[in-house]
Amino acid sequence: MTAESFAPGSAVEELMQKLRTLTYFGVGACIVASVLGAVLLGTGWSWPLFVWGVAIGPAWVAGTSAVYRYAGRYVLGTSPPPSRFHVLYPAWAAMGVPFGVFSACFETAAPDVGLSGYAVIATLVPLVRLPRLRRRFQAATTRQECPFKGACGEACSHPLEGC
């Protein structure tokens, strides 16, 4: 991708706007549905379970962001470019709210435990692949070809040949 690909009005920027809108509406619908479910079906309330669920979202976003920065420095040897998905972080952080609401209103930790486990696995498992990615990137850089084997298409921004 070139810098022009992300310019205002470009196809990538238009796609990111659609993704942003869809994500925010989806998360909002999940929150509204969980509150309605709690009001209509809830059997009680537990503040500690609610706070646990709500806290998972921001913790997951912080962990994912830290892993992205670490992985970029490890594989590339320099700081990675800023993530285009930073505009979605508030929505991703808010995804803990429905889990917290369901845990609190049904007074069970199962939704919070499930989301916590998923967040840990989804954040840490990609780190296992970093040594392989680093070796592949260094080998491709040595051979002066695209480390992505041409998968980046015509608009490749890598300074290497082969895309």
Image (cartoon, grey):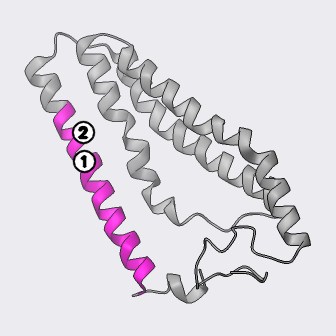
Q: Amino acid at mark 2?
A: Ile
Q: Is residue 72 magenta?
A: no
Q: Residue furthest left?
A: 40
Number of residues whose C-alpha sits closer than 10 Å to that of mark 2, classed few (under 14), some (14–19) or many (20 or more): some
User: From what the image shows, is residue 73 above or below residue 108?
Assistant: below
- Residue under the image location 67 percent in, 46 percent down: 67
Q: Is residue 147 above or below residue 2?
A: above
Residue at image x 76%, y 53%? 133
Q: Which mark is residue 31?
A: 2
| Residue at the image point whose x is 43% and y is 57% from the top | 88
Q: Range of the magenta residues?
A: 10-34
Instruction: Reply above or below: 152 against 34.
Output: below
Dominant secondary structure, magenta: helix
What is the secondary structure assignment of the residue under circle 1?
helix
Nearest the eye: 138 or 71 = 138
Specify the quadrant of the image occupied by residue 4.
Answer: bottom right
Q: In this figure, what is the number of numbered marks?
A: 2
Q: Which residue is farthest right? A: 142
Q: Which quarter of the figure has residue 95? A: top left
Q: Which residue is mark 1?
A: 28
x, y (%) of residue 159? 78, 83
Q: Amino acid at mark 1?
A: Gly
Q: Secondary structure at mark 2?
A: helix
Q: Quadrant of the N terminus?
A: bottom right
Question: Which residue corresponds to the image point at 35% horizontal and 63% vertical from the top-left?
Answer: 20
Cα distance between the residues tagged 1 and 2: 5 Å
Can residue 110 be seen at all in this image of the molecule?
A: yes
Image quarter where the C terminus lies is: bottom right
Residue 77 visible? The answer is no
Residue 14, position in %: x, y? 36, 78
- x and y, in percent, of residue 24 in the image: 30, 55
Cβ–Cβ under 8 Å for marks 1 and 2: yes
